[in-house]
Image (cartoon, rainbow, N blue to C red):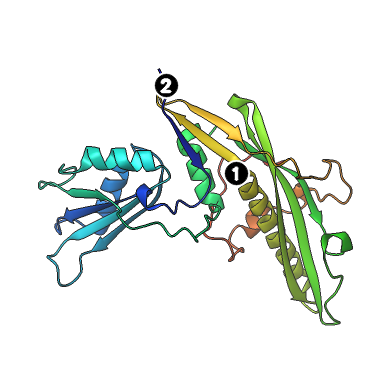
Amino acid sequence: MDIEVDIIDFKVPLENNKTIFVWDIQPTFSEAYIYESLWSVYSAFGALYLLKVCPNATVAEPGFYALVKFYSSAQASKAQRATDKQCLFQRSPLKVRLSTKQNLSFYSSKPLSLSKCHNLANHYLGFGGWSTRIVTLKDISRCRDAGCQEETDDQSVLLKYGCIAELTFQQHGMSCQGVGVAEEIIDNDRDPEEKLRKRGTLMKRAKDKAVVAAFEKVLLMILGNGKVAIEIKYDPDEILPEENSGGVIKVNDISWNEFEDADSNTEEDFPWDLTVDLPH
């Protein structure tokens, strides 16, 4: 007997067959209550990428509708069949439909944000099912081989950091690495303390990008019996520096907590949790 397998990767789900719409939500509830109720119902079918509750158009009857996007088309389909014409959290039945829009083939899937990667991994593997560590965090501002300019002019300087992070799945005996780079041009006459904060921000951004790059190599294999297997997509042409390469910055020289709110370029802020193993 063949075992059903659902494959989930760490990328933004763009396929419309992963989206369901929930109609005929009564106006007697608040948007917050509807959101919590729907999340409780649909997250039981699989990890959710997005849940959005919206008021009906002014020309329609008062009430709400919701958009629910899964990472898996199979889970979206199962959720639609199980909840259509059911009351769920209200007295009248809901109408639940799969999205019927055509996929736009020229859209390429983007990697998930760091917090989305963590949430997806925690949903299927648990908080203790994976960990990350920094292999290398290096100042490459003056590294010509990395395609950097030493200085742009007399008034500004390029700050650039590169990071290699390792993602480990202890229970599966598997690991992979990702590379991240962050850079910014700053004024030479900035206050030294401000420069230090900027360096810390760039170090954090490089580390975050490296972890996201590592997650991009991971496929979650959700088996029909509920078990989860992992497959790593290795690139035979990828060359990573040695772990003990020169110029490595010790991460305990600067506390990451000082810069957790400083990175405005990430998709969303993420509070560090216990699933990330950083050197002490």
Judge from the rendering whether residue 191 lies leftward or rightward of residue 129; answer left or right. Answer: right
* Disc number for residue 215: 1
Q: Is residue 244 above or below residue 222?
A: below
What is the secondary structure assignment of the residue under circle 1?
helix
Looking at the picture, which amino acid does disc 2 mark?
Answer: Asp
Q: Quadrant of the N terminus?
A: top left
Q: Residue at x 53, y 60 (%)?
A: 267
Whole-percent x, y for residue 91 in the image = 10, 46
Q: Is residue 43 above or below residue 138?
A: above
Looking at the picture, which amino acid does disc 1 mark?
Answer: Phe
Residue 133 vs residue 172, the one in the foreground:
172
| Mark 2 surroundings within 10 Å by alpha-carbon count, few (fewer than 14), some (14 through 19), many (20 or more) | few
Residue 272 vs residue 119, the one in the foreground:
119
Can residue 129 be seen? no
* Disc number for residue 102: none
What is the secondary structure assignment of the residue under circle 2?
loop
Q: Residue furthest top?
A: 1
Judge from the rendering whether residue 144 lies leftward or rightward of residue 183; answer left or right. Answer: right
Q: Residue at x 41, y 27 (%)?
A: 4
Judge from the rendering whether residue 91 lies leftward or rightward of residue 257; answer left or right. Answer: left
Q: Is residue 195 above or below residue 71?
A: below
Whole-percent x, y for residue 234 in the image = 68, 39
Can residue 39 be seen? yes
Looking at the image, how many numbered discs can be counted on the residues? 2
Q: Quadrant of the C terminus?
A: top right
Q: Nearer the viewer, mark 1 or mark 2?
A: 2
Specify the quadrant of the image occupied by residue 205: bottom right
Between the residue at mark 1 and the residue at mark 2, the CA separation in whole angstroms equals 28 Å
Q: Residue at x 22, y 41 (%)?
A: 83
Residue 24 vs residue 195, the one in the foreground:
24
Residue that carries the numbered disc 2 in the rendered image: 2
